[in-house]
Structure formats: C-alpha cells, structure tokens
C-alpha cells in the first residue's frame, strides 16, 4: 500500500506519547510524561513560533475506563480541559493542529471536541474518523490519512472539505 506524506514547513512541534511506536521528528519533538496535565503540556511544549502542532498519541472516541473522547497524552486531553488550547489562539504563527490519533472524530462527541479545539486555538484541526495506523515518517513530515476518513475543521470550528483545506497548503505551510 502506497502512503502519502505532507512535508511541514517549520518550525513545527511534535508532542509524542511514550507508548507510540513511531515518534514524529519535527523541528521540536518531545515525548510527553504521563503525569503532565493538558494545560502544563501546552504551556511547556507548544512553542509560540510554531506553524504546526502535532499530537502523536492514541485517540479514543470512548473507553470503558474513560467514556469520553480524548487524546491519550499526559493525563489526557478531553472536553473538560479543552481550555488548555486557549493560549494557542495568541500564537501568531500557529496555523494547524494535527491530531495523529485514531478514531477521535468517530462519534458526534468526538467531532464536537475537535471543533472546540479549533475554536479555542483559532487553528485548523486535522483528525481522523478511523484508525490511522502507526507509520514511520521522515523528519518534518506527517502522514496524509486519506484512507482513514480525515476530517478538517476551520479556526471557527466549521467542517471544511478536504479539497478546500488542501488548496491552502502553501499558505498553511505544508506540501
């Protein structure tokens, strides 16, 4: 199976969970400790000069032990702490948040969570409805999840068509 990748213009930040097989290697790449809160992660690791912020972790629409959509990074990102994304709205260069996390937009609650991330950060948010796989990427690249039903949200939290999002590649800093 042929895979496609997007090259991300820097600077970019990768927030890797300790339990992902392949770590993303961007301008700044961090493995996030499990004991950090969502707010601490953003305050400590989301650089105000970054064009792209990539969450490379497991995502869940729901789990028996945590029945809400969430990103499994630190103590988890979920609707109850989505305000952690607020500071990013003040970052002048951050344009896209890539949620390299399976199934996050699978449910309506997960889609709402992603929309709220977009609204609070004032960034485009890219996520997937199904599993995205665990693929090694070249440095400064991210996989195009076109086979995983990707979903794109505008900085206002509105659903954006794939073609409309991709048509902005140059201005958003990827190719």
Image (cartoon, rainbow, N blue to C red):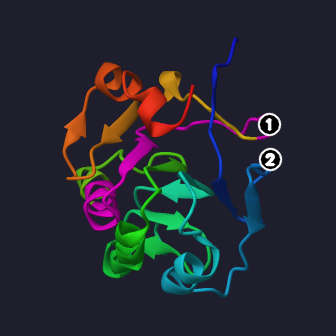
- The numbered mark at residue 122 is none
- The numbered mark at residue 136 is 1
Closer to the N terminus: mark 1 or mark 2?
A: 2
The secondary element bearing badge 2 is classed as loop
Q: Left or right of 35: which side holds 64?
A: left
Q: Left or right of 55: which side holds 80?
A: left
Q: Position of residue 158 (x, y in %)?
A: 19, 45
Q: Position of residue 107 (x, y in %)?
A: 30, 49
Q: Tell me, yes or no, if residue 158 can be seen here.
A: yes
Q: Position of residue 81 (x, y in %)?
A: 37, 81
Residue at left 36%, top 44%? 106
Q: Tell me, yes or no, if residue 66 can be seen here.
A: no
Give the answer, above or below, for where 66 lies relative to 114.
below
- Hey, which quadrant is residue 85 in on the image? bottom left
Residue stretch rendered in magenta on the structure: 113-139
In this rendered view, identify the residue nearer to me: 12 or 117. 12
Q: Residues within 10 Å of mark 2 (few under 14, many from 20)?
A: some
Q: Quadrant of the N terminus?
A: top right
Q: Quick one: which residue is furthest to the top in this view?
A: 1
- Hey, which quadrant is residue 79 in on the image? bottom left
Residue at left 28%, top 51%? 111
- Hey, which quadrant is residue 115 in on the image? bottom left
């Amino acid at each position: 199976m042929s895979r496609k990748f997007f090259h991300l213009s820097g600077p970019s930040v990768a927030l890797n969970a300790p339990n992902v097989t392949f770590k993303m290697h961007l301008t700044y790449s961090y493995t996030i400790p499990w004991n950090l809160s969502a707010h601490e992660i953003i305050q400590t690791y989301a650089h105000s000069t970054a064009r792209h912020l990539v969450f490379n972790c497991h995502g869940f629409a729901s789990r028996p032990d945590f029945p809400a959509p969430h990103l499994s990074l630190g103590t988890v990102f979920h609707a109850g702490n989505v305000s952690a994304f607020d500071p990013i709205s003040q970052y002048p260069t951050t344009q896209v948040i890539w949620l390299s996390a399976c199934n996050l937009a699978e449910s309506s609650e997960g889609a709402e969570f992603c929309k709220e991330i977009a609204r609070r950060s004032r960034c485009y948010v890219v996520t997937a409805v199904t599993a995205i796989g665990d693929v090694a990427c070249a440095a400064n690249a991210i996989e195009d999840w076109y086979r995983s039903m990707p979903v794109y949200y505008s900085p206002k939290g509105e659903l954006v068509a794939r073609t409309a999002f991709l048509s902005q590649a140059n201005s958003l800093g990827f190719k």
